[in-house]
Image (spheres, rainbow, N blue to C red):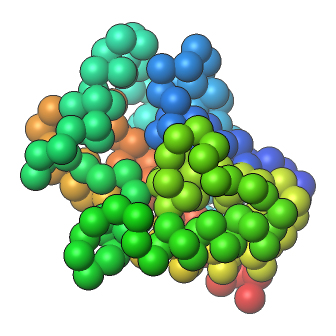
Amino acid sequence: MVTQQLQNFARQSVFDALSGLFIRPEDEGTVRRYQSALSAAAALAAEIGTDSKPFEHALVTPKPKPVELEREYARLFLGVGAETVPLCESAWTSPQQILCQEAQLECRKAYLEAGLETAGLLGVPEDHLGMQLGFMAVLILKEDTAGAAKFFAEHPARWLPGFAEALRLRGDAVFFHQVADVLDALCEMEKLISEQSA
């Protein structure tokens, strides 16, 4: 049986690696950290009884060269057209489906309550996927089980399934197509962990 410490290590690793992937994919070591985290996540998923195949499949999928990853990221997330996949919760959950709405303010409040000042950091809104995943890594590192479960349910879990599906619908998503499967598996894993801790 996996110990709480090992469970937290695996979860913190995968949230941290995914955060980097969605905020700074061009940084050296981003894909390497992602692969390392996938190994820990696959082992945890198998141990607790959720589907480990998406993590395992991502481990054996050929990894893009840095320039390929940057180009794919830009095509998918940095455009302004209808085909762009938004990286912020507001665009998925607000009635107007635009950025900088209530979800951003809710995330900012959650970060401040946890003692984190985020205004202007990294140049991304507080409801950006990378920020939300990074915050989950912080909560798990602080062993704030209840806080992590609450934040995940109120924020990433509300829009990650739609986000992952949008990635799968993009024919030009190669690397991020398998990342979508990892995000779905992560949601399943977090749901089970939350149910077991309740």
Total number of numbered labels? 0
Q: Is residue 137 left or right of residue 174?
A: right
Residue 57 visible? The answer is yes
Q: Residue 27, percent across and down? A: 55, 19
Residue 35 visible? The answer is no
Q: Quadrant of residue 151?
A: bottom right
Q: Which one is nearer the viewer's eye here, 148 or 185?
A: 148
Please, is residue 115 above or below residue 180 in the view? Answer: below
Q: Residue at x 42, y 13 (%)?
A: 66
Q: Residue at x 36, y 11 (%)?
A: 67
Q: Is residue 131 left or right of residue 125?
A: right
Q: Is residue 181 left or right of residue 34?
A: left
Q: Residue 73, percent across and down? A: 32, 31
Q: Which one is nearer the viewer's eye here, 79 or 168?
A: 79
Please, is residue 98 above or below residue 129 in the view? Answer: below
Q: Residue 194, percent across and down? A: 67, 78
Seen as rendered, the residue at the extreme front is 120
Q: Quadrant of the N terminus?
A: bottom right
Please, is residue 48 above or below residue 145 in the view? Answer: above
Q: Residue at x 71, y 81 (%)?
A: 196
Q: Quadrant of the C terminus?
A: bottom right
Q: Residue 19, percent across and down? A: 57, 43
Q: Residue at x 62, y 67 (%)?
A: 108
Please, is residue 71 above or below residue 155 in the view? Answer: above
